[in-house]
Amino acid sequence: MAFNYVADERDIPVGEKRVINAANEKILVIHLPDGFYATQAKCPHMSLPLEKGHIVGDGHIRCHFHRAEFDVRTGAVCEWANFPPGIQLLNVIRGEKPLNTYKVKVEDGKVYVDC
Ligand code: FES
């Protein structure tokens, strides 16, 4: 792994997120009030695009599709897929999995992700 340039700091305002291709991977870069964070771009529930999700609470992302919620700082599952009703049957074979997270650094207004 190595730090790869992904964006200029000003390109991703606070509260926003962007999918970046870096080192042959899609990475979701998220700008929270306390800094930048990076996670895998696909939801670990069914590999759907997490970029369609919403930032909620104190640095969580809620997947648009079945509402799994993750802490973007740690990747921890806060809430597993719970929508629509009945999704729990699918969860028997798609159990909880955290998000992969990546180290981020900002230097001279440029954002780098270790991936
Ligand atoms: S794909 Fe994200 S919660 Fe199902």
Image (tube, rainbow, N blue to C red):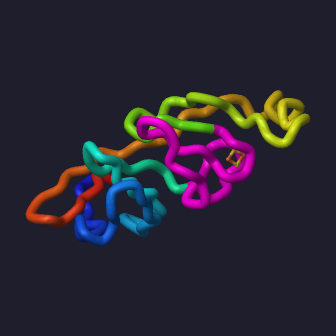
**62 falls in the magenta region:** yes
Q: Position of residue 78 (x, y in %)?
A: 57, 28
Relative to residue 91, is residue 102 depicted above or below?
below
**Viewed as shown, does residue 114 lie left or right of 82?**
left
The secondary structure that most of the magenta stretch takes on is loop
Q: Which residues are magenta?
A: 42-68
Specify the quadrant of the image occupied by residue 11. Answer: bottom left
**Viewed as shown, does residue 43 lie left or right of 94?**
left
Q: Position of residue 52 (x, y in %)?
A: 60, 60
Q: Position of residue 66 (x, y in %)?
A: 74, 45
Q: Please name the residue shown 17% across and 56% down the image.
A: 106
Q: Quadrant of the C terminus?
A: bottom left
Q: Compare residues 15 and 29 and report the one nearer the observer.
A: 15
Relative to residue 104, is residue 95 depicted above or below?
above
Specify the quadrant of the image occupied by residue 107. Answer: bottom left
Specify the quadrant of the image occupied by residue 6. Answer: bottom left
Q: Compare residues 37 and 112 and report the one nearer the observer.
A: 37
Q: Please name the residue shown 56% across and 30% down the image.
A: 77
**Viewed as shown, does residue 75 lie left or right of 7?**
right
Q: Please name the residue shown 9% across and 64% down the image.
A: 108
Q: How many marks?
A: 0
Q: Position of residue 110 (x, y in %)?
A: 18, 65
**Viewed as shown, does residue 83 lie left or right of 68?**
right
Q: Please name the residue shown 43% across and 60% down the image.
A: 17
- Residue ranking furthest to the left: 108
**86 falls in the magenta region:** no
